[in-house]
Structures are given as structure tokens and as C-alpha cells.
Image: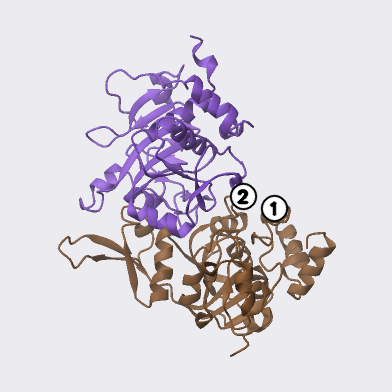
Amino acid sequence: MSGTTEATLAEICIVALAEAFRGDGEVLCNPMGPVPVIAGRLARATFEPDLMLTDTIAYAIEGNLPLGGDPSDAVVESYMPFRTIFDQVWSGKRHVVMGAPQIDRYGNQNFAAIGDDYRKPKAQLLGMRGAPGNLINHATTYWIPTQARSFVESVDVVSGPGNDTIASLPEATGRFHEIRRVVTDLGAYDFETSDGTMRVRSLHPGVTLEQAQEASAFELTVTGEVPESRLPTDEERHLIREVFDPNGVRNGEFR
Amino acid sequence: MADKRMTEDEVVAELESGMTIGIGGWGSRRKPMSLVRAILRSDLTDLHIVSYGGPDVGILTAAGKCRKVTYGFVSLDSIPLEPHFRAVRQGGLLPDFMELDEGAFYLGLMAAAHRVPFYPTRAGLGSAMLSENPELRTVTSPYGDGEELVAIPAFDMDAVLLHMNRADEKGNGQFLGPDLYFDDLFAMAGAKTYMSAEKIIPTEDFLREGPAHTLKIPRTHVDGVVEAPMGAHFTECPPDYGRDEAFQRQYAATAKDPEAWAQFRADWLELESHEAYRAKLEERGQA
């Protein structure tokens, strides 16, 4: 075993994100950004074959399209313009991966704007985009390339509501809410806790619990032994390097 | 049958300061840019723009034309954050805005198109979309479940501007690209709807261009048609043309520098007509 030398950080993150889709079955897997897109395609090509994936334009496609590959080479299995995507969100058959410039202990996420004054923010980011509707309708996973910057004590604006926010609302409101996973440059996290707080699910090879805690403004919940994030299998490594991302776009997300 | 053909300036002459104006397309995709530039060079002001925002919102807010924008996002797609809009927001230069979930935005269009006061959704519950927009209200389901939902208000719009690939002179519109976005709902929601198109063609030629389900804008909802080849430039308008990324980068770069922005406006955005703009693009080797 040559351990971590056999996988880069980006590849370990891709596998950890792919794992978030395990058990999803026949849903629309809708990852945003290169690392999540590779992860979704990898999950379908290996252990989650029934996932539906889009070409990120307007079609659901079959097969193993590389990042930036020509979608006209792919087999189209369904038409997914934006209106259908929203209908799909509300129908619930979807699992999205979004970014989170800020996320707190309960999974409240902000990618709308940074600063104390939402009316005059220090930095206008994406806006609400699909976060409010996604969170309250179906499973959501977050991809965070720099944990130390994003794990904050409290978010400036809630675009995607977290577990404590949902718990304060009537039960019917939150019945489809699920933050499945948070994957960062240091580890994978989930919310499989009784109080809805973020739990360390696994740490990437070489990362200690102290380092992960150091890179978080809130206390990480730990239950029992924390395993190491798994490495890609030979097949997964081949698919990532040769099929989905031959140009190494995945490495550009860490800054 | 009425011939609804107009020029960009004739459309703008129908608009008034203070109006709520919807703009079709999505981000930096199939935006009616020749109409947006006609607004820019007019003396219209105090506008409320309703849009899946792209450079339409960036240009009109940076030029101080807007009192309010209703949006789900403002993006140039290949440049995720619209830099002119960011500068306006961060400078506190936009008097009012309503930032919504992008799916909830669809419901506001649909409510207006269907002439009902609102459509209900779960989107927004627990998020700042509700807490930061105190004018948004919730409703309680009248059925046994009693669930509380957000009532997305109808986006009543005085005028709507769209760009299509093809149109006939009667006002039927055809999209030939991968996505209609929400332009049919925009068309139905506008008290008046003005549609530019790459090409105005005889009605009998529509089905030579694309299958019947591309004919999504019916003339019952269109008041004026503008023939504007390259009318969506620099946003994309497939299959007629893709996004002019070099031009878009040039536009985006001017957000940092007021002088460069003034120069860019003078050089490109405030030319006296769309014909002059196209002629200049041709000189540049773009058209």
C-alpha cells in the first residue's frame, strides 16, 4: 500500500462527494462546479448506476461525458431546461451539490452576500439562487474547497437553512429537508447527530482532528473513532484521470 | 392582420420612467440587448427591472436607471458574479431590490401570467429570502394539512422585453436554442410585450426552422416586433451565435474603473442605433 501518494487531494474529495450519492437510486443528481460534477459522474459510473445527470445545459445524458466534453456526443435521455429543473426540485427527486462560502454548525449556508448589512454588503455573491428552494425540498450536499475560510460561527445571511432553523419551523415545513454531507479539503462531515450539529464523518489522509477543529470557528461534533476518508479504487482513479477529467481541471479548485 | 414591426426607439418611446419592466432570457443568454441599449440611451429612469439577471441588469443599474430590481441572481454565466451589479450593490447604489429563490421567481412570473395574486411554495421558509423581504407574506393551506407556505406575489409588469431567434410580423415568436427559459410566461405577464428577433420570417417558414414545439410565444401576447440581427450580442443566442466571451470580458473589466466604463458605454452601449452597433461589430470582425 502506498497510501496517499496514490491519490491527490482533489481525487479524495471527489470520492467523498461521490459517496454522498450512495443509496440515492433514481434521482436527478445535480452537482455544481467541476469537482462535484466529476463526483456525480463517478458515482453513476460505479456504485449508483440509476442516477440521472445533466450536461449542465438542458439535457439529461447517458454515458461518461468528460468535463468540458461536447454534449452533442452524448446520448440524450431526457430534456431538462431550467423550468423542468425547478419542477424537479419541487417534486423532490433531486440531490444538489452547492458551494458554501459560509456555513455554520447546524448547516446554515450563505452564498448570497457577505457583511453585516445585507442592503449594502461588503461582497455581493451569488444571491439566493436556488438555495432556499433546494434545501426545503430535497437532499443537499455542500462542497467547500477551503474549510478554514468557510466554517464560521454564524452566517451573515441564511440562503440555505440549516437544521436548527428548520427545527424552529412547523414540522410539515421541514419534512423534505436533508443536508446529506459537507465535503471540504480536510474531511467529510454529516449531520447524523441527535442535535442536528455537524459531525466529523471522516478525515482525509494525513489530517488530524486537531487540524480539522483548528480550521473551524465552531465546535465539530465527534462520535467515536473518526475513520480516514477512503481512497479511490483503481477503477475510480482511472475514471477520474482518464475519462472524466483528463485535463486536470479538478486541481484548480483549491486556492 | 396587424403588422407589429417596430424599431428599438419606437419601443422605448412606449415606455415611461417609473415603469416595472420585465426582461426575458437568463443570465448572459438570449437577452434583448438592442432594446436594453435603447433604454440606456433614452432618458428613462426610476425603473423597476424584473429579470433572471445578466448584463441587462448590470448595465441598467450601473447607469443609474433603476430604483429597484427583482431577481433570483445576476450573473454573466462564464463570469459567475456580474461585476457591475456587484459594484452597485456593494456601493449601496441600488435604492431597492428583491432577491428571491430562482424557482420562486418562476412562480411570480406564472402568477402574473395567470392573473392570480400569488402562487404558493415552500421555497423561502427558514431563509433570508423571507426575513429580508418583509413585503413577502405567507399563506396557510385551506385544506386539512394547514401547512404554511410562502405566497410569491404576481410580478405585474408594465412592459416586457424579449429576444427570440425568429418571429413573424404578427408577433409569433420561435426559440431555436436549447432552452426557452421563462420567456413565454414573461410575454403573458407583461401588460405590453415587445419582442426582438434575429430574423423576421414569413409565418409559413417557421416549421422549416424548427419543430412546432419551438413556437412558444403566441402573438396574442406580443404588441411589437423588432428585427434585430445580433440583437442579443454579447449574450449567447444559439444556434445563431454563441456568447462573445472576449467582448463580455471587456465589458466586465470596466466595472473596476469609472473612466473605462464611461468609455465603453460611449464606444459601444450608447451608439445611436442597433445598426451602428452592428456596423461597429462588423469592423471588429464579429458579425
Q: Is residue B105 visible?
A: yes
What residue would you read off at disc 1?
B245
* For residue A205, above or below residue A121: above
Tint applied to chain A in the drawing:
purple
Residue A184 picture quarter: top left
Residue at the image position 17 percent from the left and 60 percent from the top: B145
State the SS at label 2.
Answer: loop
The residue that mark 2 highlights is B78
Between A75 and B282, the one nearer to me in the picture: A75
Judge left or right: residue B9 versus residue A154.
right
Say what amino acid the circle numbered 1 marks: Glu
Chain shown in brown: B
- Name the secondary structure under disc 1: helix
Q: Quadrant of the N terminus of chain B?
A: bottom right
Badge 2 sits on which subunit?
B
Q: Are marks 1 and 2 in contact (CB under 8 Å)?
A: yes
Q: CA distance from mark 1 to mark 2?
A: 8 Å
Q: Earlier in the sequence, mark 1 or mark 2?
A: 2
Host chain of mark 1:
B
Q: Residue B22: x percent and y percent?
A: 52, 72
State which quarter of the image contains the C terminus of chain B.
Answer: bottom right
**Residue at (62, 85) in percent of width and height:** B4
Return the x and y of residue B257 as percentages of the image width and height. 70, 55
The answer to whether dots 1 and 2 both sit on one chain is yes
Relative horizontal placement of residue B127, taking residue B24 as reference (left or right): left
Q: Is any part of residue B43 visible from this angle?
A: no
Relative to B253, residue B139 above or below: below
Residue A237 place in picture, x, y as percent = 53, 23
What amino acid type is highlighted by mark number 2?
Answer: Ser
